[in-house]
Amino acid sequence: MIFGTLALDAADGAILAHTQRLPGRVLKKGSVLDAAALADLRAAGVDSVIAARLEAGDLGENACAERLGDALLAPLLHRSRAGTGRVNLLAETAGLLRIDAAKIDRLNSVDYALTVATLPDYTPVTPRDMVATIKVIPFAVPAALLERVEALAREGGPAFTLHPFRPLKAGLVLTELPGLKESINENTITATQARVAGLTGSLLPPLRCPHAEAPIAAALERLMAAGADILMVAGASAVVDRCDVGPAGIVRAGGEIRHFGMPVDPGNLICVGRIGARPALVLPGCARSPRANGIDWVLQRLYAGLDVGGPEVMRMGVGGLLKETDARPLPRAKAPPPESPRPSRIAAVVLAAGRSSRMAPHNKLLLPDRTGKPMIARVVDNVLSSAARPVLVVVGHRSDAVREALGGRPVQYVEAPDHADGLSASLRAGIGAVPEAASAAVVCLGDMPLVTGRMLDRLIGTYDPDEGRLIVVPTHRGKQGNPILWDRRFFPEIRGISGDIGARPLLARHQEHLAEVDIDQDAVLRDFDTVDSLASLPAHLRPADLPG
């Protein structure tokens, strides 16, 4: 690949290295310069560009990324399409991810041009979680280099193994001593149930018994008879030895103790055993809390079908410090929790102030579908099912009726007093009300009831200021749609828009910050603002009597 400054006469077919803003057009970084682009550059007075030209044997960044992604694919993983030299590997099911770190290191050591970044080893994932990203650094790579890395990726076993979580039934024994507060056991049940459910399992009704060997053994036998696949004992007093009453109860029920203690804090005082093929655990006291501790690591592996015995537990020390050290002015017990980067908070702005003039005298937002739910209620419910918070509903025309249609839904209302001036007035009001704590806002139209919360979450998940993805637009078959997510830095420009238009004209002005998310349904292209369009809604979402 040749990279540098090229005269326009020598730039036909070259790859543009930096975005060029021209009158009426933006040429994005990575664009292939064709005759039309070169003509526009000349017309703008540009006589040279910084660009890359492929040489014989070179492969473009996207083709390289896709081929390396294919070489790294493993069962239960799939890859995204390439864009800007990047391909992501995604999980297809919930499970525990294993990484061959040595293989990834070997791949990354071949050449700077080809990189693979992964989640940590033993990371629990859910469907569609990104497990790795492949990034080709330059615009092109020699085919011979790619072939070398592909061969390494396919050599030996896979770099990634996803062990699916199994829907195992868990049994819990709660021991009791005089003076034990009921709230302690309730907290234990709640935390354990949440852990098990998060691993696709279920918790059998917990059993209570005195804090003694024989009752614990009897309770374990009852849980096995009820079909428990994993057994847990939560003692009224923490287990302090492998011969304590909890471990002794496991042995008395016909089991064995495989290991006591673990190099994970919190979670040191755990006992790992088994009764036949069933794992049997005596939980550390910290298991009563929902915060991350050693029991999470053990349960994740067991639900993924991985063995957990002495050798496995003793290798958990690296990364096993799950709470802060006492290297603070205050003792650890009194020290404040460690600060961590706050995730981006994304607000939602739902525009519901218009006059619905194209459907007059009817208000499209208030028309009930065949289930009796008005369109605006359907839209707001979809938004509330996403991660966006707070949800701001901009009202104006028939404000009281819109509020009534939304009932007691947890939204904040924003009045647009000049809503009659057009869409921009509602948009200005909504963006102006986004709280300072929100780093961005996704602008939703009140007449797009087919846009789901999952689609909104995909936009939110793509937003990344550190990567320059500051505007996120959904697309379907190459056509841009709605809703659009805007970083806060664009709010002043949005508030400067006037007339009956939205913020879409700003997209051409900020192409370098734009990220597109391909949606496999046309919901992001379909608004319903005419009687004819209502007839194209799915049957259950159409008004019972279409207005005429």
Image (spheres, grey):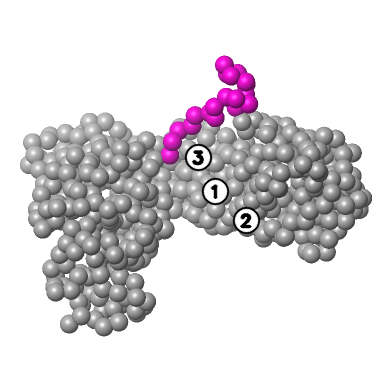
Magenta highlight range: 324-343
Determine the main secondary structure of the stretch shown in magenta. loop
Asked if marks 1 and 3 touch (Cβ < 8 Å), the reply is yes
Q: Is residue 497 left or right of residue 149?
A: left
Residue with the mark numbered 1: 72
At which x and y percent is residue 348? Answer: 32, 51
Residue at image mark 3: 116
| Figure quadrant of the C terminus | bottom left
Measured as percent of width and height from the top left, residue 341 is found at 45, 33
What amino acid is at disc 1?
Leu
Q: Amino acid at mark 3?
A: Val
Residue 333 included in the magenta stretch of the image: yes
Residue at 23 percent across and 33 percent down: it is: 50
Judge whether residue 329 is colored magenta: yes
Q: Quadrant of the N terminus?
A: top left
Q: Amino acid at mark 2?
A: Ala
